[in-house]
Amino acid sequence: MKKIIVIIICIISFQQISAQNPLVTHMFTADPTARVFDGKLYVYPSSDTYPPAGREKEFPRFCMPGYHVFSLENGATWKDHGWILKENDVPWGDKDTYAMWAPDCIKKGDTYYYYYPAQPKDGSAFRRIGVGTSKSPTGPFKWEKDYIKGVSGIDPGLLVDEDDKAYLYYGGGKELFVVPLKDNMKEIAAEPIKVEGLPAGYKEGSFAFKKDGVYYFTFAHGFIDEGYTIGYATSDNPLGPFLYQGKIMDNIGNGTNHHSVVKYNNQWILFYHWWEISGYNKLRSMRADYMTFKDDGTIKKVKPTLRGIGTPKIGDTIQIDRYNEINKAKIAFVGGENEPKGWMVCDTEMMGSVQFNSVDFGNGEATKIEARVASGQRIGSFEIRLGNPTGKLIATFPIEYTGGWSSWKTIETDITEKVTGVQNIVVVFKSDWGSTKAVNLNWLKLK
Ligand code: FUB
């Protein structure tokens, strides 16, 4: 199993990082806390990795070496800014414990405060919470020499209110906690209190935000009969008590689902994690999907999608296998010695189609479209249409033999109509009736 996962990661480690789900494929990322700073979207996840050689038996649990930070560039590409903290650089932390669980980062004034849990070397708790400061959202951070006194637990989630008062939510177990912070953001201003009003059961992943004067306290919640869900409760006070409102996301498979919520470009987004690359729930990958509110302020349950968020523009890779709709076609993970590809659309039957929403054609500058294809036959074509499988035809690719079903080639054709604005595109596969494989398709790109 491990070998397979290693091969997959090697194969995809050269891929362009795109904004479809999972958000990045060159490393395992979990517990994504998303933040918008000065109009730009950042994600602060934890990272999962394999246990170090010889220590495999110690790590049926998570093996988490530290933190990267990512920013969304041009609305469609995640930039990895690299390591901002590794476990052995925690001033107060025990060495080689791989215990860097879910972090958060928040801005107050012109300073960024990064909060993270780690295992303390003084043995005083399972996890303590440390903090570092920076003048940039991507660091470097200056790490405080000691952990925040009076707080022990996991999953720090920060809220800075409109009056500039800051609150730290944290914990994992039957109870979660909240504590106001002093102005310096590094010390507690009162004794922590239990977050009141939450349902029974295991809880973790505290994350709070404010909308229209209402405090939303969101948390991961394990129901005995249902497994791990994301729930939320509301209050008119950041310290509670809260009223449980229901689930934001149902259980999507056994294991954890740590999340955060952010408003970016006037759209609310839920960040969360799953493990589609590894197939193993301790090697996770961060994801994002749009979230909406009902008129009464309650949250509509979010369904996980492959498509995720973001709007590819001219020059961006459109990962068509991260589809909104698929009909008479499938997707599969694919690799090859010289061909890192990730997933592809395959088993494309006659009149099969795959739809990918929100592609930005701008003011109509795109005149050509590229496709990464592999085909073991030469009959037929595939078409690019707008809106639905019979919508306006804007481009046609003849199918050509590329050397086989895993011999990949980039081909190009003209866009025959001027297309503007954000459009949903549909690829329609045409071969002869009875054929179950017109072409394998990896990605598209407007030029
Ligand atoms: O990633 C380790 C732990 O798993 C986090 O702290 C929890 O929220 C859960 O996602």
Image (tube, grey):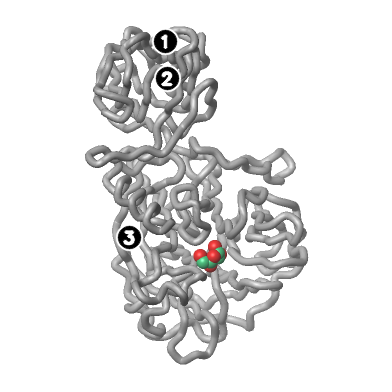
Which quarter shows the C terminus?
A: top left
Residue 295 versus residue 377 in the image, above or below? below
**Residue at (41, 21) in percent of width and height:** 421
Q: Is residue 367 left or right of residue 36?
A: left
- The type of residue carrying mark 1 is Ser
What label sits on residue 119 in the rendered view? none
SS of the residue under disc 3: loop
**Picture coordinates of residue 355 (x, y %)?**
49, 23
Q: How far, Cα to Cα, is label 1 from label 3?
A: 49 Å
Q: Residues within 10 Å of mark 3 (few under 14, many from 20)?
A: many
Q: Nearer the viewer, residue 181 or 149?
A: 149
The local secondary structure at tag 2 comes to loop
Give me the disc on residue 431: 1
- According to the picture, the residue beneath numbered tag 2 turns out to be 437
Disc 1 vs disc 2: Cβ atoms closer than 8 Å? yes
- Nearest to viewer (mark 1 / mark 3): 1
Who comes first in sequence, dot 1 or dot 2? Answer: 1
Ligand 1: quadrant of the figure? bottom right
* Nearer-N-terminus badge (3/2): 3
* 4 with respect to 212 (left or right): left
In whole angstroms, how far apart are the C-alphas of marks 1 and 2?
A: 8 Å
The circle drawn on residue 138 is 3
